[in-house]
Amino acid sequence: MKAPFAKFSPFHVDPEKVMKTFGIEDDDFNKASDAEKESMVEMHKSISYWKDALRRFRANTVSMVALFVFIACLFFAFIGPYLIPYNYADQYRTSQKLGPFEYSDDEKIARLAEGVGDGFYATAIRPGSITGIDPGNYCFRSGGKYYAFTITELTDKVIFILDRDAADPLKLYTETAVQNGAWADYTAISFSDTPAEGATQLKLVRKVFPHVFGTDSSGRDLMARTMYGARVSIIIGVVAALIVLIIGSLYGSISGLAGGPVDFVMMRIVELIYSIPEVLIVLLLQVVLKDPLKAWFDANSDTSAFVRAMSDLGAGIVSIFITFAVLYWVTMARIIRGQVLMLKKQEYVTAATALGASNGRIITKHLLPNCIGPLMITTCLQIPSAIFLESFLSFLGLGVSAPMASLGSLCSDALQTITLYPYRLVFPAIVLTIIVLTLNLVGDGLRDALDPRLKK
Amino acid sequence: MASYILKRVVGSILILLLIMVVTFFLMNAVPGSPFLTEKSTPEQIALANAKYGLDKPKYVQLWNYIKNYCKGDLGVSLKMQEGTPVKDIIFHQGKFELSIKLGIYALLLAIIVGIPLGCLAAYFRGSWLDGLLRVVTTIGVAIPGFVLAALLLIVFSVKLNIFPTRSENLPNFKSYVLPVISLASYYTCYIAKLMRTSMLDAINQDYIRTARAKGVKTGSIILKHALRNSLIPVVTYLGPVTAGIITGSFVIESTFSIPGLGKYFVQSVTSRDYPVIMATTVVLSALVIVMMLVVDIVYKIVDPRITLTAKED
Amino acid sequence: MEENKTLLKIEDLKVSFFTPAGEVKAVDGISYTLGYNEVMGIVGESGSGKSVEAYSIIGLLQNPGKVIGGSIEFEGEDLLAFTPEQMRLFRGNKVSMIFQNPMTCLNPVYTIGNQLTEVLNCHDNNISKKEAYDRAVEMLKLVGINNPEKRMKQYPHELSGGMRQRAMIAMALICSPKLLIADEPTTALDVTIQAQILELMKDLQKKENTSIIFITHNLGVVAEICDRVSVMYAGRIVEQGTVNEIFYNPQHPYTKKLLASIPRLDEETVERLVPIEGTPIDLLNPPQGCNFGPRCSDCMKICLRKKPPFAEVGEGHISACWLHFKDMIEKEAEKDE
């Protein structure tokens, strides 16, 4: 026998002494009640999977920042256009080829007018057109009064200056009146309390809004176009990702659940599509679909709201959706099938089956909730790849066409004048990069949060 | 092994056939005719159609394509270089060579730079280097290739005048730099990210713990035990990378004015030059398919668990 | 007597994991010594800290685990003061380890031979290829793998589970270490293979004169192979003694319950198996008193207030329970009367 423990058993000693050392009272050797025992057990609360995932996502600073930046991009793309007076399609003839924060000559005059009183100004009264303002009757409202005037010939720009101190408070400048920035001549216009019959009411801009990103060669405001392009790109990304999500997850889960020969055949089809270099086919599809789609939209645009919405997006974008629906769902299908196969083998699913749970219950209670993680992650990461594909196609002259804009088409337009106006590329490219970047980061954060096994 | 490769080659030929059929129907569905110009009369078009066999039934045309392709005859161009055999256009005018060179250099760059960067980031995880690499690679996968190409062009060619703005036929090393970098950047960053993740994944495996318990040096643990295992996902990604690089070359070639196959393909689609569309599609697809095969074989070398005789899912 | 000399001495070892939720005291002050050529079993349920303790001996604690107190002495040297390089040379050479799951513990992309000779190359720069190969073949033979030359060229996935664990043992013993830590080496194997592996380890232990720390939750395995047993509960040793003492004269309520919860074939009377009520404590928030208190049917008031010290209850047999003190006091009282 070995006895190496002598040093660890110092309690051959007098019990009295032990009692003293440890401060034990006689009562302490009485049995503890269950309630006392209970009170000692303080289990730390278990957190549900989703709450835990949310906590992990919140703790991920990078992903949180990315999420906020992405939300800012959404504001930029969807709210932004209502905050600036320019429209993506308006062409201001006098404002062509301006750099960021540059003003055209008449915009400078209007800015001068701001110094005098409340300046109102309109170039190419909305909605803008390259031909300026058509002849006709116009009116606008200011200070509770209606002002009416008539334009008899084609006019490029109209500047109103409301000078409250002067006897005749309103001055109207048309192109002929302005020379070299001097604005001595003006036409006074009459005002009345009631709107003129049949006149077009104008919305006026109190201040000349700067062209923050500059303008393009047709005099379109680039910030408005970038906002609009961002909106188009985000819509394309989200819709394409949803298409992929629906088709891919349906296909994948059917294949995974069915198993056997059905699964075999379905997976061979997936492999086939997977090994086709899809972009070659996409390019062909784009060209093929464009004209027939356009014709079909023209013929059917009145039939339903859905068709109208599609035709508003344009044939280029819809054919992008179609190519996604045809070719890009295979990755999603593979992931979901793998997930379903893995889950099917899990003991808790076997246990549920053994306990007599119905198929429907197993799918809704066990398979779906466990698939949501990968579904969300893949969908989130699918959006940037759709945006990429669209920009790629727009670059090659497919995808969206002018005056519509997407971030890709803006970049592609800018490339033609890249040496002269590099900022035209820089702004949409930065917005595109930020959107893709933040979506990637949010996707990564989701993956880390939803799948702790993949963390680190 | 040999029987596996044979099987795969047969499968690849079937896929190419399928691609031919799909391409044929797609390009015939494109409205318009290669001979349609502002001046052409219906008679002229009919004449040209008869000359090139476009008046025959579609299935006969398709059969002719397949028959001729088996013989190695890719047909003649209808429009872009009328009358010139497509084979000569692709292989003898340097287009194929240019695209291949560009693609291979970009692929090599992505592998040679991406893998070590990923390893470094994983090894120094949590350090400033890891942070820096994460920022760079994350931004790298968010910039489209053509945007990067344009930015590089502006900075290095226009402003600094270090590299030529038009790379043309890639006469010297300098003309390669910008196109290859723009083509490879996305994939370099993606591979680096993938490598970092899979390296970290490998580091947490039981066999790494065993290696540590054996007293293996840290460097050796990373380079021997973790690296080879973590290469497996990267190798599987190389197939899609090849496809992506070929795709990317379409835009890079037009940005840097390189008369390669990618640019030519896009032009052929817009000018409806049927034999050229078919030939470029088949050649580019074959490239991707061959690369997929190579990837599967490399996969086998890296991971002895994969048996090439039985196809596993 | 050589075997009485101390090989490993652990004193008041404390290991904590610093998780986002707080500090988890995985090992909370354990002490024991291990002699040369001795087999010590460490028994406890999942999460009792038995593996963590072993990992800290061999220096394989992963982040966020940290040794925060106590000492580990191996042949008189303080392991906690070793540099990483010293620790590396120590691992696999003087101490080696085998793990629970032989399926995942061998690197799938290298041959068995490669992984075996690697250990030798790591600890002896001068060893020739031939020597290393011969030694590896010899080790494979020793662990009862037939046709070792063929196995050397094979990959782990081409071997069965039992065969892989044998290869792991060969790898662990190839440098003739003084101490082998076996972390549940038989848990993942099926019962017949378990018995073979145990037999092999017993055999090799005698042949190679290696001390073994055998970590398991399987009391049957402990009875089979160990000289002494430490029973761990929630990061602490609750009872320690020779195999016979622990099995036939358990003193701590936890050990008693543990023994009552396993089926025995040698008893004449048929008894019901008794499960241990309740769940293990939350290590993030350990109770102030005895860790087992809340689950103990004999729990006293003191047990909820103070952690019990060790009492020597037999020769080389110690147990940490206040009941022993109660008995002692009662005996004293009887004596006095």
Image (tube, rainbow, N blue to C red):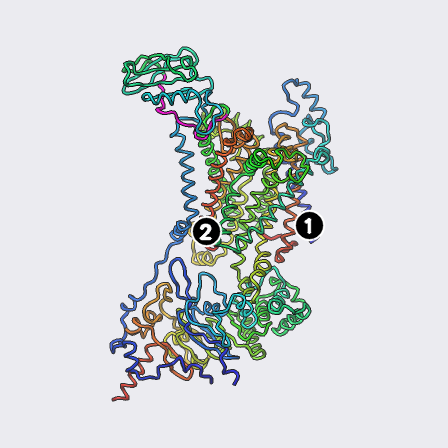
Is C56 above or below relative to B240?
Answer: below
Q: Secondary structure at mark 2?
A: helix
Pick the front one: B139 or C266: B139
Q: Quadrant of residue A328?
A: top right
Residue C169 percent across, percent down from the top left: 57, 71
Circles 1 and 2, Cβ within 8 Å, touching? The answer is no
Residue neighbourhood size for the residue with mark 1, other residues' Cα within 10 Å, grouped as few (<14), some (14–19), many (≥20)? some
Residue A305 percent across, percent down from the top left: 43, 29
Please indicate whether residue C232 sits to the left or right of residue B52 in the image: left
Residue at the (32%, 63%) spot, across then down: A42
Pick the front one: C236 or B132: B132
Please indicate whether residue C61 sits to the left or right of residue C124 in the image: left
Q: Which residue lies under the disc numbered 2?
A: A448
Q: Is residue A226 magenta?
A: no
Q: Secondary structure at mark 1?
A: helix
Q: Kindly report which numbered mark, 1 or 2, lies closer to the viewer in this rendering.
A: 2
Please identify the dominant SS of the magenta region.
loop
Q: Quadrant of residue C198?
A: bottom right
Q: Quadrant of residue C259?
A: bottom left
Q: Which residue lies under the disc numbered 1?
A: B5
The amino acid type, in three-letter code, at marker 1 is Ile
Q: Which residues are magenta?
A: A200-216
Residue at the (46%, 61%) spot, across then down: C63
